[in-house]
Image (cartoon, coloured by chain):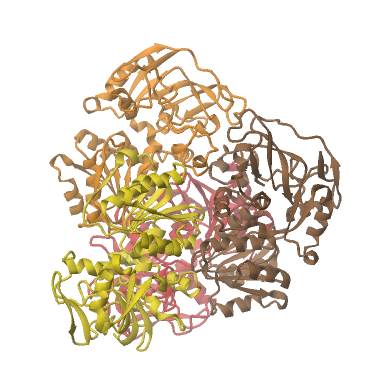
Chain colours: A brown, B red, C yellow, D orange
Amino acid sequence: MKALVYHGPGKKSVDERPKPEIIDPTDAVVKILKTTICGTDLHILKGDVPTCTPGRILGHEGVGVIDAVGSAVRAFKPGDHVIISCISACGTCNYCRRSMYSHCVNGGWILGNTIDGTQADYVRTPYADTSLYHIPAGAEEDALVMLSDILPTGFECGVLNGKVEPGSIVAIVGSGPIGLAALLTAQFYSPAEIIMIDFDDNRLEVASRFGATSVINNKDGKAAEKVLAQTNGRGVDTAIEAVGVPASFITCQDIIAPGGVIANIGVHGVKADLHLERLWDRNITITTRLVDTVSTPMLLKTVQSHKLEPKRLITHRFKLDKILDAYETFGAAAKSGALKVLIEA
Amino acid sequence: MKALVYHGPGKKSVDERPKPEIIDPTDAVVKILKTTICGTDLHILKGDVPTCTPGRILGHEGVGVIDAVGSAVRAFKPGDHVIISCISACGTCNYCRRSMYSHCVNGGWILGNTIDGTQADYVRTPYADTSLYHIPAGAEEDALVMLSDILPTGFECGVLNGKVEPGSIVAIVGSGPIGLAALLTAQFYSPAEIIMIDFDDNRLEVASRFGATSVINNKDGKAAEKVLAQTNGRGVDTAIEAVGVPASFITCQDIIAPGGVIANIGVHGVKADLHLERLWDRNITITTRLVDTVSTPMLLKTVQSHKLEPKRLITHRFKLDKILDAYETFGAAAKSGALKVLIEA
Amino acid sequence: MKALVYHGPGKKSVDERPKPEIIDPTDAVVKILKTTICGTDLHILKGDVPTCTPGRILGHEGVGVIDAVGSAVRAFKPGDHVIISCISACGTCNYCRRSMYSHCVNGGWILGNTIDGTQADYVRTPYADTSLYHIPAGAEEDALVMLSDILPTGFECGVLNGKVEPGSIVAIVGSGPIGLAALLTAQFYSPAEIIMIDFDDNRLEVASRFGATSVINNKDGKAAEKVLAQTNGRGVDTAIEAVGVPASFITCQDIIAPGGVIANIGVHGVKADLHLERLWDRNITITTRLVDTVSTPMLLKTVQSHKLEPKRLITHRFKLDKILDAYETFGAAAKSGALKVLIEA
Amino acid sequence: MKALVYHGPGKKSVDERPKPEIIDPTDAVVKILKTTICGTDLHILKGDVPTCTPGRILGHEGVGVIDAVGSAVRAFKPGDHVIISCISACGTCNYCRRSMYSHCVNGGWILGNTIDGTQADYVRTPYADTSLYHIPAGAEEDALVMLSDILPTGFECGVLNGKVEPGSIVAIVGSGPIGLAALLTAQFYSPAEIIMIDFDDNRLEVASRFGATSVINNKDGKAAEKVLAQTNGRGVDTAIEAVGVPASFITCQDIIAPGGVIANIGVHGVKADLHLERLWDRNITITTRLVDTVSTPMLLKTVQSHKLEPKRLITHRFKLDKILDAYETFGAAAKSGALKVLIEA
């Protein structure tokens, strides 16, 4: 089969690889119908993810058809259409019992990281019963690949952790795909305002279309000042960090109201300053989270009931054999305007 | 009347001052029976609290007898014995409505800060109905001065924010009065372990008597290492910062388990590093809080039912005219072994 | 001034009464701009509310302008435009401290019940600071009279207590004004389905326009059967009782899924059967609640941000001197199609 | 092997039966070390549980040693000492994902009900990874059989659902084994008072020893009156129903304070009156629950840390071949004073 293989920092190619087989009784093998590329895949390609070693098939997102299942798989059978979660959850360890699948001691984020991933014709998915989700009949499959990772990440790490509520004021720092995923799912809770902050006018224009009530281009470094001005100096109830750099985390600290929540989604490579000398008495909460994908069933229901349109995140489409072009388009998002690129196997 | 007056950095004296009077209809004047000294009073005396200007009577803790009430006070009458909360809550602003009295726009921490305080024969307390608490008949009044500030602070900022639960593992970094207050009140929730960390063996010995299941002297800088060793590398569910310096906040980051909470109580004068490069995917929560004193009624019930013995925190007693000695004893806690000093008016 | 006065079961008239005056320092006198009639007013007129004695001016809803305030009122001054909450909250008793204003020991539902109410040119409102709400500049005042009672009631007793969530399935039994208030505010949380049940096709038609995803006329007594059929036998996550009779409470029991919540809004005059022999092991929750009006500030924000349009509930308008006509229209809702009638002073 | 077999209403015997074998890859076979008898077993023997058919080996509680595991079992291996949960949880269905194991569509309460149970030398346990719990080295195994059912039931259905809190007032109606389990675990949260109500002075005397702060014998039918008297007419914050008859559920309604919770544990055979005409405006919550056993890991930690002593519930001990005597003793609890009887295989 064809697969996108990582060959060390800066190197990748579409290679011919053997079709995967069932190893453990809880495994499934899934024929990939659609997959996509995540910002994390770009991190791997820069050599920033040491757990991912050369020779690895990348990709942790996808929808597909069950090809084979192990003897202990109860919930799926060949022919079933499924969403593949980016998180593999054994369902039995202490973390899984607490619905913290992200820290599953047997799984977690392993697909396209420590085991071969979804940017291929087939993938072996461990713990199928607790890591795959049935696609309802009649659903728009393309769009559901957005439920593998980006939408649960924006929702769980940003919106749920951020305690977005009816009437509340939310700021999202970073209007890339993950910030937009938070923007789309924050609207489940009818906040009064969602302020989107970025450096890129195109992305902010997308944010406006996606439901932001106001947008701020922070090129002049005055975003915090402006947010305070438009909230009568009080600040926001929820600040969602969707970039992953110290500066945007500082912006969150600058705009958070007493009693508010800073919900970090960003993947950070370095430490950041925490201004406890200003914040110790502000009754704030800061959260971090690797997505648990516990909200996938709920998100599926919101898609089915048209409260969420995942396909809005898809800007480009490629065939699997053109996945190198897809990487180029996604990697040059500032120029291409790419949000998520859909890859059809 | 006699009062302890702040005269600028490093300067204080016991002065003769006029007895306070009712100004607003929601005021009470309280004759002080007992008061105490808080670490914050020492901060003021160092000149670290610019809102507190020379001429101010210090003190934000106390029990006393109502001497007079304004025309709008419904819940109290002269002769009633009361606990004075360190936080004055108007009860009507948006923050008070959300039970965030700490950020009351009309009150908050004002006693012994922006208005005259409790280290005196009498004090005027604004918003009496929502800032004073009746002392039940038969209660041990001395001890209840611990409910003005230190016990609600340890409980709300440390234990409640820290989500201490039956069976959980708690570490408290800092075994001073506030850390000990957290230790006493954490036991309401039957955690499996409470690990106390400090540099002072005497304080750790007190912690052992107060219910710590293990103590670690961090003189060798190996506290984090030891905590991880005794938790099988997993870390703690709740880490309570009860010092207020970057190093102890870093210790909390080093020992927190995935899914855990770092609850900050400490008053910080400088920023601290937040190691988001390690913590972004650990699903942790960090909280800050100035005490709201919303738990005072609950704490009173736990005292009445003997689940909490506030007097364990009292190590020394002085008369009001010897309050300068009390300051000396409290300020030299390392030598004197002082936790809280009781001052009788 | 003019006022609608209750003169015993079945008797009411528009009388001339003296303008009310400030009694307590926490009082305000409000000039009424708009008021309305509540189902509870009809109960009083039937003689079903013994606490309301002849001679009482009815009405517990209204918007108006502050005419005078007592000496202890801080948040309001003459000329301020305000919403009058149906619940008077002293802000200081144990229940108020717990945000359970409904059970305020000094207030609660007293307006138009144990003290004179809002169906008049002026009303005295006790505890003004914690019982009135500022109307934001530019707001549509007419509609805000819906925030005095019906919208917080539908929201708090039905939606909040019912734990409506994104993706969940909600049934509302009763499509009268209060059921419709629950329907409008349930949509804050993006449930997948809202099933409305009633005996009146007109009311169900209104429900469809207001956002119900399906409606069931229960004339044939098969509502429960139909709800189970359309939920694959599982039932609903939230069942909201918005009638106040045993039969509709039984319907809720018949359709609730394991783990679900039955949130009662209805005012019940008799006991109901609780089928514990079927429900003891179903992990359900049943809640009752008299509105606390703690959500009024949040609801105001949702109105300001156009997530909620209160005026949709207003079907008829009358001048105060025609309030007897308004009562007739409202009392004959089945014929008149009245939801809420607006009365202009 | 030997097994206690149900042969239809009123009939049981100790029979010789073949040792069970692994059927599904997720199964384990456990050699029973200790088991016990539950009130539910007596219900089965009366013929009240139609799902349990003649020929069934009874028993859903036990500790034992793993004898064999299926190919998909990851967490256990032969020789491991385990607690057997009364609830079999597949870990993958929608209910299990929501931690509602009680309603697992593949399992739930099946042991000793729809499949053979634990009152035997060996038992086959489905879904071993999510239905068994490791016994920590050095633990007192006898006592841990109380973690199969009775302690999680008292804790989850009574204490957790009842929202017991520091300083709160709790009443438990029913001082049998399950009421006592609630009593023991309610103390995790340091309530101010726990009032125990029963008709049997012996059981109430046990309650006093187990931590009840007061006991009421309700032979005179005046329990509600007395509870109100000793709470100044206010009632209790949490009322736990631990009998399963209408009268005790009514008592809970009579004593619940506004804002309180009635947590039902009892297994009810008939409906009960719900006095909505008094309760509709009392802001109360009523919960029902079949135990989920999600708290078993937490309870194990509280046992390890000596916050809970399960063996206090064990009053009698028998060998498996004397299990008919055990049934007799347990069935005649009023006379024998039996709480839980331990059966050693």
Q: Nearer the viewer, residue B331 or D154?
A: D154
- Dividing the picture into quadrants, the one containing residue A269 is bottom right
Report the residue that reaches farthest toward the top.
D16
Up-down relation of residue D315 to residue C205 (above or below):
above
Evaluate whether residue B344 shows in this view.
no
Residue B69 drawn at (x, y percent): 26, 79
Up-down relation of residue D166 to residue A176 (above or below):
above
Q: Nearer the viewer, residue B149 or A294?
A: A294
Evaluate whether residue D28 shows in this view.
yes
- Dividing the picture into quadrants, the one containing residue A56 is top right
- Give me the residue at 35% from left, 49% from top: C252
- Give me the residue at 60% from left, 37% from top: A129
Residue B314 drawn at (x, y percent): 39, 61
- Give me the residue at 50% from left, 34% from top: D89
Labels in figure, total: 0
Quadrant for the C terminus of chain C, please: bottom left
Q: Decide if residue A27 is on the left or right side of residue D270.
A: right
Q: Nearer the viewer, residue C114 or D135?
A: C114
Q: Decide if residue A178 is on the left or right side of residue B55.
A: right
Q: Nearer the viewer, residue A232 or D78?
A: A232
Quadrant for the N terminus of chain C, please: bottom left
- Dividing the picture into quadrants, the one containing residue B294 is bottom left
Residue B340 drawn at (x, y percent): 42, 63
Residue B199 drawn at (x, y percent): 57, 56
